Amino acid sequence: MTRALTIALDAMGGDHGPSVVVPAALNSLASHEALHLILVGDEEILRTALQSHKTAGRYVASERLLIQHASQQVEMDELPSQALRNKKDSSMRVALNLVKEARAHACVSAGNTGALMATARYVLKMLPGVDRPAIITALPTMTGHTHMLDLGANSDCSAEHLYQFAVMGSVLANAVDGTVRPRVGLLNIGAEEIKGSERVREAARLLAESSIHYIGFIEGDGIYAGEADVVVCDGFTGNVALKCSEGVAHMLRHFLKQEFKRTLLTRLSALVAAPVLKAFRNKVDPRRYNGASLLGLQGSVIKSHGGADVFAFGCAIREAMLEVAQDVPQRIGRQLESHLVENSTP
Amino acid sequence: MTRALTIALDAMGGDHGPSVVVPAALNSLASHEALHLILVGDEEILRTALQSHKTAGRYVASERLLIQHASQQVEMDELPSQALRNKKDSSMRVALNLVKEARAHACVSAGNTGALMATARYVLKMLPGVDRPAIITALPTMTGHTHMLDLGANSDCSAEHLYQFAVMGSVLANAVDGTVRPRVGLLNIGAEEIKGSERVREAARLLAESSIHYIGFIEGDGIYAGEADVVVCDGFTGNVALKCSEGVAHMLRHFLKQEFKRTLLTRLSALVAAPVLKAFRNKVDPRRYNGASLLGLQGSVIKSHGGADVFAFGCAIREAMLEVAQDVPQRIGRQLESHLVENSTP
C-alpha cells in the first residue's frame, strides 16, 4: 500500500479561490488513492462550494477531505509584512500551520507570492545552513525539462547564496526526477571579457570545489537547449528570464492562432491541422509546469500560479505529492549538513 | 535625391566572414541607390569573393563598392583586451577607423562582441555625458516592436547608468521609429515586497524627475505584450532575457515542426497548412531583427549576430542606414547635453 499523505490547500488563495481549488482537490482525490486533502478557508464558503460537486460527499465521509476553517484571507496585492502582522488567521497561514504541526505533509497556495514566502519562513523556519529560501520550478526544454532557481525570492544574492541554491536544486532534481548526478549550470552571459559579475564567478569557484556535479556557465538559450538539469541564478535574473519566456511563448501562440484565422482558406487549413496544433499546444502547455517549490524551509510549500485553472492547480498538487514522497526538505537538510562537514574538513 | 551614405563592413567578422558579408553587401547595394559600401578585410580574399558574383563589377566600377585592405582579423573567442593590443590592423579596427576618419558614416560587424565594444570605445570615444556604451536591439511584440538595452555590454550598472541607457534608448526609438515620446519602462520583478533592487528603484527616481516619458516598472512578460517602446535594464539581465527569449522561440518552432513531421497524416496536414506556417515563420523570423546598435559612442556601430546569414546581415546594414539617416549619435549627444543642463538648473 502506498503511504498516505496529507496536503493542506490554501483554498481562498489565487485569482479564483475555491472555484478552482475545490474542483482541483476533488480531481486529485479521484486520481490518487493515498491522497488526503485539507481545504483551508472560510468554512461556509467551502461547504457551499463542495455541495455543487456530487463526488465531494464521498471524500468528506471517508475523511480524505477535511475542512479547516480560517477567518481571513491574504489579498493578492497585500504587502507581505502586513499579511504577516494582520492576517494571523488567513487561509494561507493556517495551511502553513498545519504543516508546522505535522498535520499536513505539505501546503499548496496560489496566493500572494511575497506573503507566502514571508509567512512560510516565519511559520516553518529555514533549514540549518540555508540563509534564504528560493523559488524553483520545472521548465520544458528541447530534451525534457530542467529546474531553475531562484525565480524571485531574492533580488540580490551573494555567491554563497547561489551555492546554496545549487545544492537545493540538485537535491530536488535528484528527488523528483531520479537523476543520479544532476548537471548544475550557473546562468551567465558570454559577451564580457571576464564573464559575468563577480558574485557569479565566485559562486563558480565554490561549486567547482564542491561535490555538486557543476558543469559551468550556461547562457539563456542553453536553458531551453537542455544543457543542465538545474539552472542557478539570482532571483532578479530568474524572475525576468521566466516572465520573458512566458511572454515570448504567449506571443508566438498568439501569432500562430492569428495566421490560421486570417482568411477562410487558412481557417480551413486550421481544421485539417487541428490534431497537430492540439498536440503542439499540449506539449507546450504552461499549465503542465504549474507548481513552484519554496526550497530551504523546514517543510514543503508549493506555490501555484495565481491565475491557475483547475488543471493547472491539480499539477501543483501533484508536484507537492512528489516532493513529500521524496522527503525533499529532509534531503536538502542532510545534503547541506554533509557540505558543511565537507567544508570544515581541514 | 537621397543623401549618399557610406557604411564600412567588417567583411571578415562573424562565423561566415566574406561568404555572408559580400553577397549581403551586393543585395543591399541593389536595393538602396544612395548606399555606398566599403568592404574591409583581406583584399585578395575579398576580390576573389566578389568575382563569383556577376553584379559586383558594376558596383566596383561605379565606386559604390570599395575594398579597404586589413591584414588581420579578430577571432570570435579572442579576449577583447588582446584584440585591442595585438590586432591594430584587423578588419574590425580598420572599419571603425573609417568611421573615426569620417570616410564612413557607420560600421557593421558580425565579429566578437566584446572586442567590437572595446575597440569601438577606444577608436571612436564616448559621447560626453555617457559613462558606458550600451547594446540595444529591436524585439518583436504583440503590438509591433520594442527596443531593449543594455544587452550585455555592462554586467553591473549603477542607477545613473540605467538612466543614461533610458535617454539613449528614447532617442533611438524616436529617431528610427518616429515615436514622438517613446514610453520608457524599467525592467523589474513583481514578487518582492519592495520591488527589485536598490539601483532599479533609484533609477526609477531619476527617470521620474526627468523629461523622459517614463512609464514605470515592467516585468518580463510586459516586454512582449508591448507595454513600452524602450525597455531598460542592466546588461546581465538583458543578455539573459534576450537569449532566453531566443531559446524559447527556437524550442517552440522545433516542437511545432516535430508535431507536423510525426506521421504521414500530419505531414499531409503540414502541406495544407504550409502557407500559414510560412507566414508565421516570416512573422517571427529572428533574422528580421538582426542588427544591434552600440549606443553612447561618437559614431554609429552596428553589431550583427555572429551566425547571421545573408538576409540577416542585410537587415543589420539596413539598421545602420536608418541610424545614419537619423543622426542617432549626434541626437543622443544633444539630448544628454540638455539633460545635463536640466539637472544643473538650481
Image (cartoon, coloured by chain):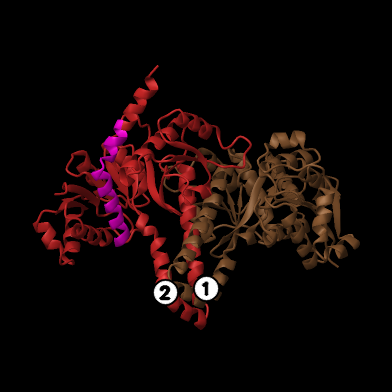
Chain colours: A brown, B red
- How packed is label 1: few (under 14 Cα within 10 Å), some, or many (20 or more)? some
Q: Pick the residue in front: B83 or B135.
A: B135
Q: Is residue A323 above or below residue A202?
A: below
Q: Residue at x 46, y 64 (%)?
A: A258
Whether B312 is among the magenta residues is: yes
Q: Which residues are magenta?
A: B310-334
Residue nearest the observer in this picture, A71 or B198: A71
Q: Which quadrant is the C terminus of chain B positioned in?
A: top left
Give the total number of marks visible in the rendering.
2
**What amino acid is at disc 2?**
Ala
Instruction: Please indicate, yes or no, whether residue A38 appears anywhere in the rendered image.
Output: no
The outermost residue toward the left is: B61
Query: Is residue B281 among the parts visible in the rendering?
Result: yes
Q: Choose the circle earlier in sequence order: 1 or 2.
A: 1
Q: Is residue A270 above or below residue A237?
A: below
Kindly identify the residue that appears in the image at 73 percent across and 60 percent down. A318
Q: Residue at x 61, y 49 (%)?
A: A149
* Residue identifier under label 2: B274
Is label 1 in contact with label 2 (beta carbons under 8 Å)? no
**Mark 1 is on which residue type?**
Glu
Q: Position of residue A131 (x, y in %)?
A: 68, 38
Mark carried by residue A170 = none
Q: Is residue B183 above or below residue A108?
A: above
Mark 2, Cα crowd under 10 Å, few <14 / some 14-19 / many 20+, is some
Label at residue B259: 1
